[in-house]
Amino acid sequence: MSETTSEATSAATTGERSGTTQSRRASFALITLVYLVALGASAAVWITIDDGPFWRAAYADLVGTAVVFLGSLLLRSSSVYDPYWSVAPPLLVGGWMIELGASPRAWLVLALVTLWGARLTWNWARGYPGLPHEDWRYVDIRRQCVDATGHVAVYWVVSFLGIHLFPTIQVFLGLLGAYVAIATDAALGPFDAVAAVVTLAAIAIEAVADRQLHAFNRDKRPGEILDRGLWAWSRHPNYFGEILFWWGLWLFTLSVSPTPLFALAGPLAITVMFLVVSLPMLEKRSRARRPTYAEHARRTSLLVPWPPRRG
């Protein structure tokens, strides 16, 4: 996913200080080209397939993912996919709104998803060091694949299935709530107000947490732990905000009667992914790299912001 890690942000800052701004610009140009090709291919699929807006969006999303994967393969960096997490949803929601109708609820959902996507994409961009950088998790996966098989080609199969396709499916499931909200013709109600407040709060939490992390990485010392601001109440407040965002989108479905239970698949799948995959990997790495992290973990909540333990 596109969440900015402290390692990536630090690397970008170091790169700019070392005079690599030009290479970052070239990297952004290449990635932009990949995404424009992916957008064109996805739009062609959406226009030519006559299978209803939901499935046309699904097919277009898969084709876009495949094109971005080819870009990752050609540029030899799976991190080319990272911004897809936040770039694709506003486009999918916008396409649904065009086909299903621009109701007040649809405009509200589109505005929220666009705000979330624009902010998260900007956060990725300012922390991206440039090609051939890869997220440390991808580097670990590559090393494990090569050590186990001796063939780097195996890594690219794993990359397509696990780093590209799996997150695309997760995010598409997360957008089920948005699809239901846009497809309904029910009038705006109190559940929409609650959903909007929760979703905006999630975006704000992510924004504050990422800003605090970015500031910390500018001046941190080796082994130092961010334990100020939101990070004093949660070890991963940016991930808490991300999970809360998808639950906020699901809350819009409560305005539909009867409420479609299938939309729960999205926030549940994303929550499980963070709790079972992303957070354990981050925790293991932090404990291995920072001697005082175990004590920090004892005092500080893993995810949900909560006053730190004393003593």
Image (cartoon, rainbow, N blue to C red):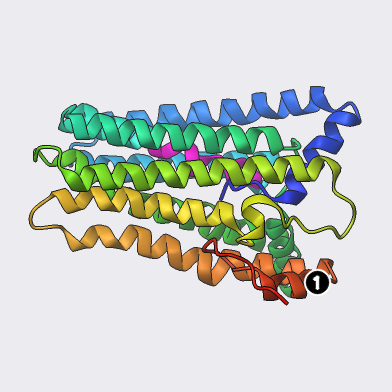
Q: Residue at x 23, y 36 (%)?
A: 49
Question: Is residue 258 covered in magenta?
Answer: no
Query: Residue 289 at x, y = what percent?
Result: 83, 66
Q: Of 256 and 99, which appears nearest the observer?
A: 256
Q: Which quadrant would residue 73 be assigned to in this image?
A: top right
Query: Residue 206 at x, y = what percent?
Result: 54, 45
Q: Quadrant of the C terminus?
A: bottom right
Residue 115, above or below 260:
above
Q: Is residue 291 visible?
A: yes
Query: Residue 57 at x, y = what percent?
Result: 30, 40
Q: Which quadrant would residue 232 be assigned to in this image?
A: bottom right
Q: Amino acid at mark 1?
A: Ala
Mark 1 lies on residue: 288
Which region is colored magenta?
79-89
User: What secondary structure predominates along the stretch shown in magenta?
Assistant: helix
Q: Residue at x 77, y 69 (%)?
A: 293
